[in-house]
Image: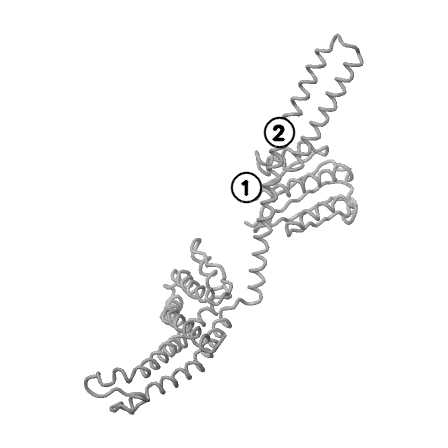
């Protein structure tokens, strides 16, 4: 980048910055007034909207600098919650300090970026208009221009203004940018939280897309392949009745074909339920778990709290977690009863499976609990197992659900 381009870009940056500076300084004094009123107990309702104005203005500056912006503060909810969100946000005090610093320096630097080019233009064109000014003669650099020799010095003075602009404006723009970046950059923990939020959102989108694809496969198998197999079974039954007078071997072949088609139909239905159980879509997680408990060989009760429908991928993971856990209970625990508890707490869906069996269950490679661990880890969740000898055994799985 050559010197003239750097000077032009610096002048543009500073002049645009003077616009935000003209807003920043009055907004800073508004923040001071609201703070004083809040200390007197009458300015608390103004804290949240004023803080949002500060965030909008600083967000515009962040976008100019290509910096990530913190989320907007909530406008809804109880007043104490909104006040705590505004005051407790770590970005708020740094934004208020930026208002003061940018308001004081931005206006001065903006007038400098505008004044140097105008002064240079005025000096460069001085020979064209110096005799046209009424009254006292114009002045350049403090001396009165009242003759042609003095007027012809104007272009040389303009070159001087241009040299000063080339030296000052890029440096001033760089200092202004560094000042804004130092005050508006997110703190380390804030950057980490933003990265975690972005990764969580990306993972949720991927899981939701995966769940939609599984539902599409389930509908294809349910509405297409399964119906054709049902038709095959019906036609084989009709064929078996039509062959009543046929040789015994022919009837046996038709019977075996019908049994094979029926087995294929059963396997297909099991595969459909393994992809995405239809009961989960139709009745929700609580209804699906109730149906799962009704089929359990070990008497099982389900305790669910009242919570809204969750993302399909999360509901499916919770369902299969409970299914695998109850299978392990039936195979290894020698339990007389089991309980499945499901509740939502702070954005985490928690599934607890407890049985009164012999205990001593252990996770690890080769264990039936490994699949549950992997399923929870895929969501960024975790599973914990408590199983002392003699029982009871409690498996607790926590799944983030983005609520």
Secondary structure, mark 2, is: helix
Label placed on residue 77: none
Q: Nearer the viewer, mark 1 or mark 2?
A: 2
Q: Residue furthest left?
A: 135
Determine the image quadrant of residue 321: top right
Which residue is rendered at x = 44% and y = 54% of the image? 78
Instruction: Find disc 2 in the rendering and name its residue.
Output: 224
Percent coordinates x, y for residue 272 in the rendering: 65, 34
Asked whether 328 or 137 is in front, the reply is 137
In the depicted structure, whether residue 163 falls above or below residue 330: below
Q: CA distance from mark 1 to mark 2?
A: 28 Å
Mark 1 packing: few (<14 Cα in 10 Å), some, or many (20+)?
few
Instruction: Find disc 1 in the rendering and name its residue.
Output: 309
Percent coordinates x, y for residue 77 in the rendering: 44, 53
Q: Are marks 1 and 2 in contact (CB under 8 Å)?
A: no
Percent coordinates x, y for residue 393 in the rendering: 73, 44
Secondary structure, mark 1, is: loop
């Amino acid at each position: 980048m050559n010197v003239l381009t750097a000077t032009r870009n610096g002048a543009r940056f500073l002049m645009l910055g003077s616009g935000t500076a003209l807003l920043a300084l009055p907004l800073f004094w508004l923040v001071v007034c609201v703070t004083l009123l809040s200390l007197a107990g009458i300015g608390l309702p103004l804290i949240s909207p004023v803080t949002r104005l500060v965030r909008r203005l600083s967000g515009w500056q962040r976008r100019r600098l290509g910096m990530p912006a913190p989320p907007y503060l909530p406008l809804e909810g109880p007043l104490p919650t909104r006040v705590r969100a505004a005051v407790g946000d770590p970005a708020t005090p740094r934004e208020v300090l930026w208002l003061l610093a940018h308001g004081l320096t931005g206006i001065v630097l903006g007038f400098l970026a505008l004044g140097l080019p105008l002064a240079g233009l005025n000096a460069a064109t001085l020979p064209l208009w110096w005799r046209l000014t009424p009254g006292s003669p114009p002045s350049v650099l403090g001396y009165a221009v009242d003759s042609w020799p003095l007027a012809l010095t104007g272009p040389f003075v303009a070159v001087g203004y241009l040299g000063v602009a080339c030296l000052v404006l890029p440096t001033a723009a760089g200092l202004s940018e560094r000042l804004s970046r130092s005050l508006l950059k997110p703190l380390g923990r804030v950057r980490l939280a933003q990265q975690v939020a972005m990764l969580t959102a990306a993972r949720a989108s991927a899981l939701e897309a995966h769940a939609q694809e599984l539902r599409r496969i389930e509908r294809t198998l349910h509405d297409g392949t399964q119906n054709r197999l049902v038709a095959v079974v019906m036609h084989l039954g009709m064929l078996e009745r039509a062959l009543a007078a046929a040789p015994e071997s022919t009837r046996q072949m038709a019977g075996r074909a019908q049994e094979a088609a029926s087995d294929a139909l059963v396997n297909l239905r099991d595969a459909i339920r393994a992809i995405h159980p239809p009961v989960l879509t139709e009745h929700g997680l609580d209804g699906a778990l109730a149906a799962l408990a009704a089929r359990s060989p070990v008497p099982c009760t389900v305790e669910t709290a009242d919570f809204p429908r969750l993302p399909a991928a999360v509901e499916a993971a919770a369902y299969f977690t409970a299914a695998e856990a109850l299978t392990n209970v039936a195979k290894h625990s020698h339990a007389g009863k089991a309980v499945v508890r499901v509740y939502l707490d702070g954005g985490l869906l928690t599934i607890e499976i407890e049985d009164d069996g012999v205990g001593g269950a252990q996770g690890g490679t080769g264990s039936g609990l490994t699949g549950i661990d992997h399923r929870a880890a895929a969501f960024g969740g975790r599973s914990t197992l408590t199983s002392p000898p003699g029982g009871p055994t409690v498996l607790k799985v926590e799944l983030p659900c983005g609520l």
